[in-house]
Amino acid sequence: MFIEWRPNRPSNQSLHQQIVDWMKQQITRGEWPVATKLPSQRSLADSFGVNRSTIITAIDELIADGLLETKVGSGTFVSNNTWNVLVSSKQPDWKNYVRNGLHEPNLKTIQDINQYETDTAIIRLGTGELSPSLLPTKKIEKTLQSTSFDAHSLGYSEPKGDKRLRQCISVYLETKGVNASPSSLMIVSGGLQALQLISVGLLQKGSMVLHESPSYLNSVHPFQSAGMHLVGLSKQGRESIPTQIKRINGRKKASLFYTVPTFNNPTNTTWTKEERLNLLSICKKDQIPIIEDDVYSDLWFEKEPPLPIKSLDTDGLVLHIGSMSKTLSPGLRIGWIAGPITVIERLADIKMQMDYGSSALSQHLVAEWLASDQYSKHLEWLRYKLIVRRDFTLTLLNQYFKGLAEWQIPQGGFYIWLKLCKPIVNPNLFKQALKENILLNPGYIYEPNNNTHLRLSYSYASEEQLAYGIQTLSKIIRRLI
């Protein structure tokens, strides 16, 4: 439970009474239904900015009023006594609804990450997002100011998305060797929505989804929540991934294979052209569609990566996902899917049922950037800035993490997949770092039971934050070891 409210210190009313009144309000309004568990006394004290003794006094008063109850070894809960039942007699059992909802909840660590990322005092060492200083804010403002709109351009777009934007993306994909006509493209609200549409639009409940492991898929639940069964395949194993696919598919038919083949999230590995051809060959033979998540491929440094798997696809086997979130702005919420027209029309129909199309304003802006040379110029500048950040981070790791961890030099993207020398990546390390205002992305959110890796990002935190965060993290790790 994340609490944003704080008592008003200049008020004539005591702090403890303000807290009592606010908690009563949460209960009587139904925002805290019966059986809601309160955070610990220490957490409440931190949230409210008061002493723990103030919290104890407030809770004791609410217990005396019959609104709260304590259960030994379990904590403090909204009471289920007669007075409270009368207050909440019209409340449905929301706890039961929440428990039985179809969508899988995030892991507790993911929930904490989502919560603390909004705290400006936190140093975000694992965030897969561009720093505000790397976003072309002023240039985007200038584009919007110099662009004229009519009522039609700001209305709902057609099911596949703005036609001009799809034409621009089609031309852009040609530079990557991908031939996708505007009719075979659809606009989505970011890459994650593409996966959600695929999960509910193309697969049956119980389908087996193969993916390389560790994987971004384990940190979100688009397939799991739709009733799919995920099977992770390791590139580091004795068998190649094509061999693993052949063996697994011989027992049970796989529905698709998901991959981030260029600057992978979280490992930052990149498939060679030969590996891409081998994957395409086995998937073609076994008729397993490939979902190619290609959101990082524009962020190469010294050398361009191999062309996308989609560029090698002559059979309509690959659904290709792209996005502007990692290069232009995550807030625009603009991505796309390229694939066979029948598939695109199916997914577009479902998207119209979900949100009636992505933001018309964002689509118009991205089309303007792609139609001019603004996007390509921005990418050149962004790559340079990311190289500087990467090199600075590598210098820090060489200074503070020698003997503590191993890592590879990133050739693009956002991430360093840091392998610690001891298996101490667990919720305790996560909490210890939080105490120092450092937010981590631990390996176990990308691969169950991975207690040796951290996903470090050089794309978000400032140089000052990176320097303090990496040095402090090394001290925490040495202490735990």
Image (spheres, rainbow, N blue to C red):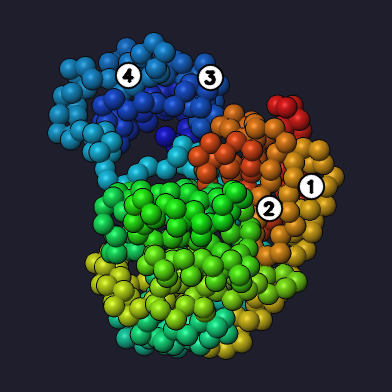
Disc 3 and disc 1 in contact, CB within 8 angstroms: no
Distance of label 1 from label 2 (alpha carbons): 10 Å
Residue 363 occupies which quadrant of the picture?
bottom left
What mark, if any, has residue 68 been given in the picture? 4
Identity, as a three-letter code, of the amino acid under mark 1: Leu
Labels in figure, total:
4
* Discs 4/2, front: 2
Q: Earlier in the sequence, mark 3 or mark 4?
A: 3
Q: Is residue 273 visible?
A: yes
- For the residue carrying disc 3, how many other residues have a C-alpha within 10 Å: few (<14), some (14-19), or many (20+)? some
**Residue 196 or 469: which is nearer the viewer?**
196
**Residue 169 or 28: which is nearer the viewer?**
169
Residue at (23, 20) in percent of width and height: 80
Report the residue marked by disc 3.
52
Report the residue marked by disc 2.
416
* Discs 3/1, front: 1
Q: Earlier in the sequence, mark 3 or mark 2?
A: 3
Percent x, y for residue 470? 74, 43
Residue at (44, 53) in percent of width and height: 247
